[in-house]
Image (cartoon, rainbow, N blue to C red):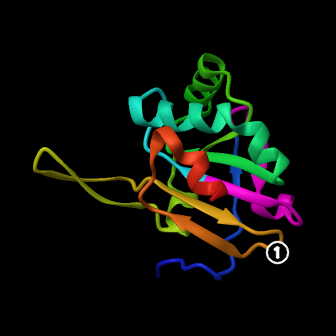
């Protein structure tokens, strides 16, 4: 079942880069940006994370909490955060639980080969926990503008 704008965002429990448990329900009353990306330290994912980092203050000023999600480990996330000076938590979804809740783990193609991977998608969730926007055609270098439009 594919999530749509207006749907209640699925709650989850998952670990961040430091092993702290994060739940969507922790952020009730706040606007949340959850962005799913394929892999730490790859060109597109780095461009996307750095765009969010560079515009983090503008996002905070509009009341947004930012959470990144990939299948990378806590250790990989720690290195990525340290290297890129990211001010927001990254969720280590190594078993694809959160991906599956949001429908962001699926079939992809590269060089004629089909494989399973992260479908780069961002969900903007309102204070009531409802999905306000779903961005599937992510512009990695200008992602904040897509969120704040």
Q: Nearer the viewer, residue 92 or 41?
A: 41
Q: Nearer the viewer, residue 29 or 114?
A: 29
Outermost residue, left direction? 112
Residue displayed at 71% across by 68% down: 11
Q: Where is residue 21 in the image (x, y as percent from the top left)?
A: 78, 47
Magenta stretch containing residue 44, yes or no? Answer: no
Residue displayed at 54% across by 47% down: 143
Viewer can see residue 92: yes
Q: Is residue 123 above or below residue 131?
A: above
Magenta stretch containing residue 33, yes or no? Answer: yes
- Residue 113 located left or right of residue 19: left
Q: Quadrant of residue 57?
A: top right
- Residue 72 located left or right of residue 30: left
Looking at the rendered structure, the number of numbered marks drawn on it comes to: 1
What residue would you read off at disc 1?
128
Q: Nearer the viewer, residue 25 or 125?
A: 125
Residue displayed at 58% across by 35% down: 51
Q: In this view, does 147 lie above or below 16?
A: below
Q: Callout 1: few (<14), some (14-19), or many (20+) C-alpha neighbours within 10 Å?
A: some
Residues rendered magenta in the picture: 17-34
Q: Where is residue 108 in the image (x, y as percent from the top left)?
A: 27, 56
């Amino acid at each position: 079942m594919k999530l749509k704008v207006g749907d209640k965002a699925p709650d989850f429990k998952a670990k961040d880069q430091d092993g702290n448990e994060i739940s969507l329900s922790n952020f009730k009353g706040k606007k949340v940006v959850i962005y799913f990306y394929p892999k730490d330290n790859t060109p597109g994912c780095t461009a996307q994370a750095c765009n969010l980092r560079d515009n983090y203050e503008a996002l905070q000023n509009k009341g947004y909490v930012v959470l990144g999600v990939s299948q990378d480990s806590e250790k990989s996330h720690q290195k990525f955060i340290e290297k890129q000076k990211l001010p927001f938590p990254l969720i280590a979804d190594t078993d694809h639980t959160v991906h599956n809740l949001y429908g962001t783990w699926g079939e992809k193609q590269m060089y004629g080969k089909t494989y399973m991977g992260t479908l780069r998608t961002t969900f903007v969730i309102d204070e009531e926990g409802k999905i306000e926007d779903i961005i599937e055609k992510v512009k990695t270098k200008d992602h904040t503008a897509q969120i704040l439009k």
